[in-house]
Amino acid sequence: MARPSPRHRADRGRARRLPRIVSSWLALLGVLLACAGAASAHDLPVNTMVNAFVRVHDGEADIVARVPMDLLRGVPFPTVQGRYDLTQSGPFEELARTLLADAFVLAENNVRLTPVRSEGRIVAVSDRSFDRFDHALAAVRDAGRTTAPVPYDSGYLDVHFVYPVKSTASRFEIQSQVAIDIGVLAPLTVRFVRGDEEGRAMIIPGGADPVDLDPAWYRAAGGFVVLGIEHILTGTDHLLFLLCLVVPVRRLRSIVPLITAFTVAHSVTLIASALGFAPRGPWFPPLVEAAIAASIVYTALENVVTTSIGRRELITCLFGLVHGFGFSNALGDSLQLAGQHLILSLLSFNVGIEIGQLAVLCVMLPLFALLRRWLSPRRLVVVLSSVGGILGGVWLVERWQVLWQVDVACSGAGCLGHAAPWLVASLALLALVPMLSAYRRHRAVVISRRPQ
């Protein structure tokens, strides 16, 4: 009886170890799921929104803002029977306007502007005069206008500040520091109007750096390149997927197709999402985050249980679609800062992501080569992939818990209409996997039959 070859014995040894490896992973994930079931979710802080119009025209700039009274607790407004005493609130409204004049930082060509006059009044929550700039301005200026009773800690303070400016064509920036004194980072919704142009809206985080209200193309492009680099370098889950993706590959010519597939796929969903073609609903962002964690677990598990990664380009492309949605979720709030340069900003953000990826690979690949001096290539793959898989499993459990708490109900055909094209594309990519494998086997047979 012929003795089995060393390769056959190695394959048989891996076959014996495979059930133990899979069962160990399943046991680990089971423990994580059990822990997640007992964990309690923490409540996220809810910031109170400040709304404002900024208009630049005829040598002056106007800020008309609506500030929730709950953010002005440092001002001792007089009350009577649980309501604000509007007849006695004049001096305190003036004090609040003085504080808000410091909180709204408006700059022209990097020079901070100082308001030359201000006005304001307390209004009830039911007041609807803040739908347009001219309506809001007229309501603030109408000091004699009667208003409904305003219960304490509700309602708004509407304020109007006027700033002299040198030119309507200048570069204007704004920064909000409202309610920082009471430890609240209140976001600011700004609608910017320059001259007679149609305005546009953006949301600025409280306490953030000054934001350009209408950036030039080169400022928008440069800012989004930096934003893309920062996002990929601080995106631990994306970097961990990248590590699990390339750790079993030793040749540069084999890494290039993987990175290309990932780049093309996430570029498609990133741009499509920014243009409004992504599925909508509160369920989608947490679903994407959970799928990103699942992509790490799958890639790591594949690295551990097999040495064959022949179909990885298509799997990478499929996961790249998911990661592109994740990039778009991170970009969503910042895209409003692109001004009139939407497409340019999208491409610049994508360029920044690729620069960050290349920088990470320039560190990863020499590090892998160095580690292979002390560990065998297979052991290095198993160790790093196991660490990545465990972290991915923890994230998967945490993100699944968040997804489970979200109302997944969506608006029927509209919701399915947005999700269906991406589901079809994903299934098409999965269908190509066995076709590519068959093509590679056929090509290998053809090459082996060629005369030497």
Image (spheres, helix red, strand yellow):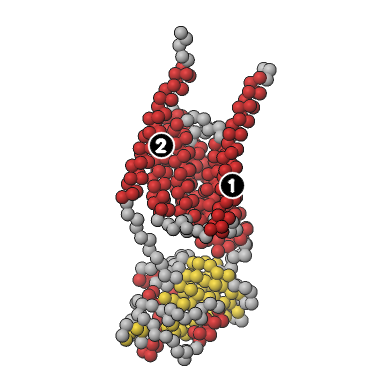
What amino acid is at disc 2? Ser
Residue picked out by circle 1: 424
**Which of 428/56 is in front?**
428
Measuring from the top left, give residue 16's x and y in whole percent.
40, 25
Of 334 and 226, nearer the camera is 334
- Looking at the image, which residue is at 55% across and 43% down? 318
The quadrant of the image that shows the C terminus is top right
Image point 47% across, 85% down: which residue?
A: 119
Q: Position of residue 18 (x, y in %)?
A: 42, 29
The residue at the far front in this view is 412
Secondary structure under tag 1 reads: helix
For marks 1 and 2, the one nearer the N-term is 2
Distance from disc 1 to disc 2, alpha carbons, whole Å, reads: 32 Å
The vertical placement of 196 against 291, above or below, is below
Measured as percent of width and height from the top left, residue 297 is found at 44, 41
Q: Could one spot residue 87 in this view of the protein?
A: yes
Q: Badge 1, how many Cα within 10 Å: few under 14, some, many 20+?
A: few
Coordinates of residue 287 in the picture (x, y in percent): 47, 51
**Pointer 2: what residue?**
386
Q: Quadrant of residue 81?
A: bottom left
The amino acid at mark 1 is Val
From where the camera sits, is residue 358 visible?
Answer: no
Foreground residue, 100 or 446?
A: 446
